[in-house]
Amino acid sequence: MHSVTHDDAPLLADLMPWSVAPLRPGRAWPTAPDPASLKARWDALLKAEGPDRRALFEPTRSRTLHSAVGQLPGRPGGTEKLARAAGPCPEPVRVLAAPFDEQWLIPDHRLIDAARPELWRVADAHQVFAVETAADGPGPPLLATSLVPTLRPGRIRPLYRRPGGEEPNLTPGLLEHLAARLGLSPTPLDVLAWIMAAVRPGLAVPLTADPELWSHGVRLGHRLLWLMRRDGDRPKLPGGRRPYVRAPLPPRPLTLVHDRDEETLHLDEGRISPVPPEAWDFEVAGVRVLEEWFTTRTAEAEARTLAAIRPPTWPQSWTSELLELITVLTLLAELRASQVEFEVTESLTSADLRAAGVLPPSASARRPATVLDHHEEGPEGQFALI
């Protein structure tokens, strides 16, 4: 990505020391591209009894209908054993289920093999999660999201260690050292923006002491964050470049084909254009994002499973999401050229940071903060003591 080599560039794992392993869902059905299907799946589970409920649940070693599990932090889900559970479905929440694919999840600890409660404790409107993609090809090595990420396989690094945007997950002393060297006052979000712009394959992050270059990299990174988080104004392409539905999509499209010459996406007889080749070719960890997004919504589910409960026809909301996804991928592909040209000079090396006492991070910086300021309900309604 960079033409300048930095053999002693610090690693992301040292700059953002606290990381959490990816969630391990254990079963696919509590996640879906639409919330109505999740509520219908929950109702179907609770209407079933005995062996039928057990089969629908899809038990694993970590979760069965008889698992005693505490509440997911900050979520109102029940804590009685699912074998005798009743009541409405916990309100689904938006999550990042795959690269650039925002879906819905039933936020119930009893349904998720390894939910990583420490992530849910710090998930709020201030939080940004950096997600490692394990990409060693042309795709981005890091994603960013404001939603709880449920995708695999990469580790998750929250920007803040506490709710409310408190205590940045940056190695202690880094912000102060950067401020002194740059003559600027970078915020935690500025540092994450720089990381997004400068990170290289292998998750090395060259730093700079040049305030002009720093500001350029931070501007580039903030635009990457805006496009990946998608939690502000909707991104748009200028004028005639905006993708539109040129021919109506069928009720249940089954095939997705891209015509590179015409820059057209065919969903059976439905047509969307313009869809530049750069958007169609956009991959993360070797997987084409648009194809994966479409397959998730159209692939046949196994009969008589909860995952088979889905919308009978293609919802209009999915078309809107697809148009926005095409726009985001097009703009991100354009930013790649800026990243390729972005050379980090006057780098601050790991040796510099060690000499300044910034590296290595302390052992406590690699552990989650103690953030519990309210009771969390444990199994069978008992309060958890943490």
Image (cartoon, helix red, strand yellow):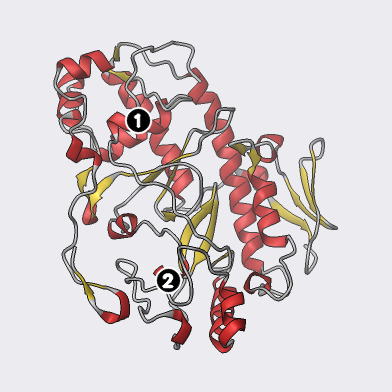
Give the quarter of the figure containing the C terminus: bottom left
Q: Decide: few, some or many residues near mark 2? Use Cα within 10 Å; few <14, some 14-19, many ≥20.
A: many
Please tell me which residue is depicted at 37% across the width and 26% down the height of the picture: 217
Q: Mark 1 belongs to which amino acid?
A: Leu
Instruction: Let me know if residue 44 appears in the view.
Output: no
Horizontal side, residue 105 vs residue 56: left or right: left
Left or right side of 10 for 172: left
Amino acid, disc 2: Arg
Residue 195 visible, this orientation: yes
Element at label 1: helix
- Residue at the (38%, 12%) spot, across then down: 7
Residue 291, percent from left and from top = 70, 48
Q: What element carries label 2?
A: helix
Q: Please say if 327 is above or below 299.
A: above
Residues tagged 2 and 1 counted as in contact (Cβ below 8 A): no
Please name the residue that numbered disc 1 is placed on: 12
The percent coordinates of residue 34 (x first, y second) are 58, 69
Q: Gap in Å between the C-alphas at discs 2 and 1?
A: 33 Å
Name the residue at the right extreme: 269
x, y percent for residue 278: 66, 34
- Examine the rendered structure and indicate whether residue 139 appears above or below residue 9: below
- Which mark sits nearer the N-terminus, 2 or 1? 1
Q: Residue at x 50, y 44 (%)?
A: 153
Q: Mark 2 points at which residue?
A: 110
- Viewer-proximal residue among 246 and 42: 42
